[in-house]
Structure formats: C-alpha cells, structure tokens
Image (tube, grey):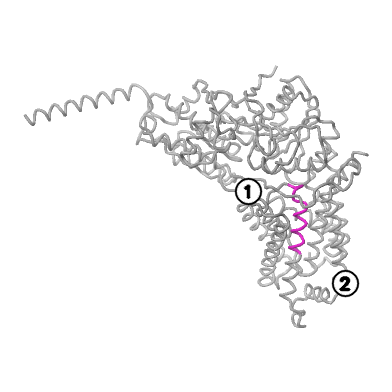
Amino acid sequence: MNALLTSAVAGLTAGGTYALLGVCAVFTYRLVAVVNFTGAAIGTAGTFVLFALYEAGFPLWPSVLAGIAASTVVGVAIGFIMTRWFGEASASTKAAVTVALLVGIIAIGLRLTGGQHPHNMPELFPGSAFRLAGVEVTIASVLTIGLAALFTVLADLFLNTTKVGLNLRALADRPMAAELLGIRVQLLSLLVWGMTGAFTTFALMIIAPQRSPNFMTLSLLVVPALAAALVGLFRSFWRTLAGGIGLGLVEGMASSVDSISQYRSAIPFLVVLAVLLWSQREARWDEAR
Amino acid sequence: MQWKSSLVAVAFAGVSLAAMAGTASAAGPTCKDGTIKVGAVSTITGPADFSEVPKATQAAFDAVNAAGGINGCKIDYTIADDKADPAVAAQAARDLIDNKEAVALVGSGSLLDCAVNSATYSRKKVLSVQGLGVDAACFSSPNVAPVNVGPYTLSTAMAYYATNQLKSEKLCAFFIIIGGTQEAYKKAIENWEKISGKKIHLIDLTLPFQGDLTPYVIKARDAGCDAVLTNQVEPQVVQLIKTVDAQKITGIKWLFLAPGYTEQVASALADTKQPIYVGTEWEPFTEKSSPANAQWAADMQKAGRPLTAFSQGGYLAAQLFLKVVASIDGEVTRESVTKALHEMQPITNPLAGSPYVFGTAKVHSPMQATKVMRLEKGAWTVETPDWVVLPRAK
C-alpha cells in the first residue's frame, strides 16, 4: 500500500505537465475550434531556442524570454495557416492538418537540434518543495500543478465574464457570423495561438530537465495532454485539470505493479478509448458518427 | 646498331614482365578490373544516424586506395542508407549483393540491417563484418560477426565489473525493451549470474522509452540497490541522472552501456555528483593520446572525420577486412572472401580488447572485453586502464 502511495506521488510531476498542456489544448479548442496536436511541439521549439542560447553562453532569463518570443512566433505562424486556409474546414480536417504539421515540426526539429544528442538544460526552478511518502516533490512539479490550476481559473473567468471571451466563443462556434458582427476574427485567433504558444513554452521549459531532452519526446507530450483534455470532453477546464493529474498518478502507480508496468505508456490511449466509448453513447455525439 | 639495342630492350622488358606476372600468380590477392567491390547497409536518415560507422570505413579504404590498393586492387566501397525502414533495408542489401556484386559487407551500422537482412546474407552466402552491431540479430546470425562488444555482452561485462571490482552486493538491472531484445537482455543477466555465482537483486524490463522516470528511481532506492545497470541511450541517461538528483538519492552506482559514452552526456551532466560508469565498445575514444588510438586518430584526422566511438567501429571493421583480404591467394571473389573469413586466424588490433575472428560458428560475438569510464566533473576518465575481459561461464 505504501509502495503504491509512493509511486503515485512519484507520478505527480508527470501529472502536472499533462494537466497544464491539457488545459492549454482545451483553451485552444474552445476559442478557435481546433484540436491542436502541435501544442507541445510549439512549446518544444521555444524550449530548444532557450537551450541553444544558454549553451552559447547567454544569460538565463533573457534566453527564456527569447525562447518564449520564438515560440509565440511559431504559434502565430501555425495559427495563420489554420485560420487563413482552414478557417472554414471541419473540425476533423483541422485536427488532421495539425497532425501533419506536428510530423513536419518534429522532422525539422530533430534535424536542427542534432537528433538524439542531449542538451545542456538549465533548471529554471531547481530544488525540491517538500517530501511526501518518501518522494521529493520538486518545486518544478508543484509549479506546473499550480500553473495548471491558475490557468484553469483564469480561463474560466475569461471565457465566462469578459467581452473578449464572449467574442472568442462566438468566433469558435460561428466564425462567419462572428465576422459579420464585426468581430476581428483573424486578429483574435492569432492572439489565442500566440498566447497558448507562449504559455506551453514556459510550462515545457520548467519540466524539460526532468524529461528526455530531445525534440521528439517533448513534442509527443501532446498525447497524454490530449487524453487529459478528452477527460474534460474538450469543454471543462476543471475536469481536464483533474484528468491530467489523475493520468500522472495512474501512470506512477502502474510502474510499481510489475504485471502492468510494461503497458504503462499505453495508459493515455486507454483513457482516450474509454472516454470516447463512454461519450459515444450520448445523443449529442450522434452527428459525429 | 640502333635496331639491335632496341631488340635487346624489348627482350629485356618481356623477361621482366614475365617475371612480374610470375610473382603475382604465386602469392597475394588479385582482382578483375582492378577493383574489389564492398558494401555497407547503414541507417543514415531516420530516427538515428549511424553514418559515422561506414564513413570511417570509407576513410580507411580511401587511404589504402591512395597508397595503391591491396596488391594493386582498389576497394570500391558503396554505402546504402536503409532509412531505418525494413523494406528499404532489404532492397539496399539486394542491390549491393546482386547489382553491385559486393564480395562482402564491411562497416555496416544500422538499427535493423541484421534483423532484416541476415537471412538474405545466409542465402546469398555473403558475410558481414558489421562495424556496429545494434539489434539482437547481429549477434545471433551465422553470417554476421560484429567488431563491437554489443549491448548484450556489454551488459554482462558491466554487471561483472560491478560485482567484481565495485563490490556491488545488490545489483539491479533496468532495461528498455525495444522489439525482440527482451530474451537477449535476460540472457545477458543469466550469463552474468553463471559467471559470478550471484543473483540479480531486481530486474525490471519495463523502463519506458519516453516518460517520467521518477517512479523507477524511487523503486531502485526502495529496493535497496547499491548499483543499477541500465541500457538507456544518450538523452535518457541525462534524464535519469537529473531525476536521481532531483530525488536526492545517494549511495547508488549508476552503470550505463556504450551509447551513454559521449561528450554531450558528459557536458550535460557536468554538475552531478552521482557515481556514473559506462562501458566502452573499444579503446576509449576520448583518450586522444592513447597509443592504441594513434593510428585511428591519425587516419581520421587526415580524412577530416570526427573522432567518435562510431568511427572506431567502422575503422576497425575496415582494418580487419583488409588483413583478411591480403591473406587471400588468387582472385578476390565473394567465395574466396567468405572462405578466408571462415578460416581466418584471430586478429588482434589495439582498438579492441579481444582478438577478432569470424569463423564458422552459428552465432558470433568475438568481442568480449570493455574498458570502463567514469564521469567526473563533466569529463570522462578511464577507470580500468586494463581491459575488463569477460571470463567464460562456469
């Protein structure tokens, strides 16, 4: 029992990451109606800009800012592609386009960053916050969970109480109607893309030292993140937050049970499958079938 | 008088030509069209890049060609990229064997060449002096004999080093299992148990290729491991040690295989105080002044190639192959090369701790020795100046 608790706590670091990236995915979906597979890859691009500058001897925090700026540009560029050419496309087409973009970004990223070679990663927030059940809970993982919660609260407030939030929701649901009403569709969309890009980048910079430092691994964090978003059915920020942290805990626990630990990496897919099966029985998914 | 002296000159030239032809037929290799065709299948583009291996082989052959070749025969070397795609790998091997008429494969380094092509090599009766055996099939096929120790024998050797020299009492092993490597790693640990007479304290074959490693390092700590052996590759080595540091774990020695032995890993882990050991495939490449590395380093620098461990493999494969070809009397064909490799005497080379022999066994892993490096303050230092040679199992 104690071992199970220990390994569950050990999964917290991963859980915070999944939650944060998941909440970003829901944010993008609710505001620009795109299931975005490139989320983590955009963040990874900025993170590698940080590594490159840091390895070249630039001071840490200006490099962080430069990295965030770089991925904001990448985010806006992808947003431009999505709104310009696929604005009126169906949700599934948009998702497929982001998958294609993800493959492209990974291919280019691996080439530019030297493939499997590890990088010298600065720890933005080193050290451990406290010890729980024999596990050091790092400041980085507390921070990711805290940021995920903060983003959840802010996103909820923003969408439900502000005029810009309302405009953006209109834009996601009926882009054409929104445009006719005089909402500056293109500008607002690009703003969302840039903002989520900047935010995921900061999240990835915090957790990168605890992950395998290569471009592909970091970009593929999008899979558990989307699983978490699916737990929230791409609507609820709070359920996504809980889904992400829960996913991390389950993965952690799975590694302590020998008979299932080899299937550990399949857990996000099982969650996706379970949520899809469960949601398919509801009437509002009828048209999707 | 003019015509008489010309006649003498012609007669003299004829005699000396006949004499030269006589010596050529008496000893040494000969070749049609002045070339010996050799190939390599390597992963160059795709998820991994092993091109350093055949490029070093190429450099070694170029040097021989520049000096006139072996007994006048130039080596015509073709490197095929398998893109880590089984279909492309199979096509590349068939092209080298059927169209290019390669007499042998030398200096290949690939993620899947052995697994995909070893049956083809057996069927076509062509042998591969693999520069870097990666997948399990490279060490379990009659027609492939790698010049590197390989991950499985190296696992046994590092476990042997842990108990024999580091005096580990509770050795644990964590392995990433990709494809069909599970049996090979299990066997590696069983071999160590036979050699050392000890039992593995904990073996975990579920290490993820990507994902958080915190639960695993906690598991190692809570199980009381005093040494942990793992087959993590470059970036994961860094991730593992960073996770260990974040968890403030002390008192465990961390043992890795050759993929962890790079300059990038050293610089990425410059700040850690964890005891980190890696096993090398050949004479440590970072020891630039080592006499064993002198010839390789000189030849690589002359060819403008970087000094990496991979390039040692390709270079060594070329050197061993050249010696075997030089021992052939008569025409160098696929048949004569295969025969020579089957019947060769073991050849020693200062780059490796064991003599290389191909032979006619069903499986080959001639290399059984490693040198252990330790990471200290961002630099690799030699921990075992003498080779750690794996004894035969009791």
**Can the viewer see residue B363 in this picture?**
no
Q: Which residue is mark 2?
A: A160
Q: Is residue B347 left or right of residue A59?
A: left
Relative height, residue A129 to residue A233 (above, below): above
**Can the viewer see residue A49 in this picture?**
yes
Question: Do dots 1 and 2 share one subunit?
Answer: yes
Magenta span: helix, strand or loop, mainly? Answer: helix
Q: Quadrant of the N terminus of chain A?
A: top right
Q: Is residue B58 magenta?
A: no
Secondary element type, mark 1: loop
- Amino acid beneath label 2: Asn
Q: Callout 2: residue from which chain?
A: A
Residue B93 position, x and y percent, is: 52, 40
* Magenta stretch bounds: A196-211
Residue A51 position, x and y percent, is: 68, 52
| Label 2 packing within 10 angstroms: few (<14), some (14-19), many (20+) | few
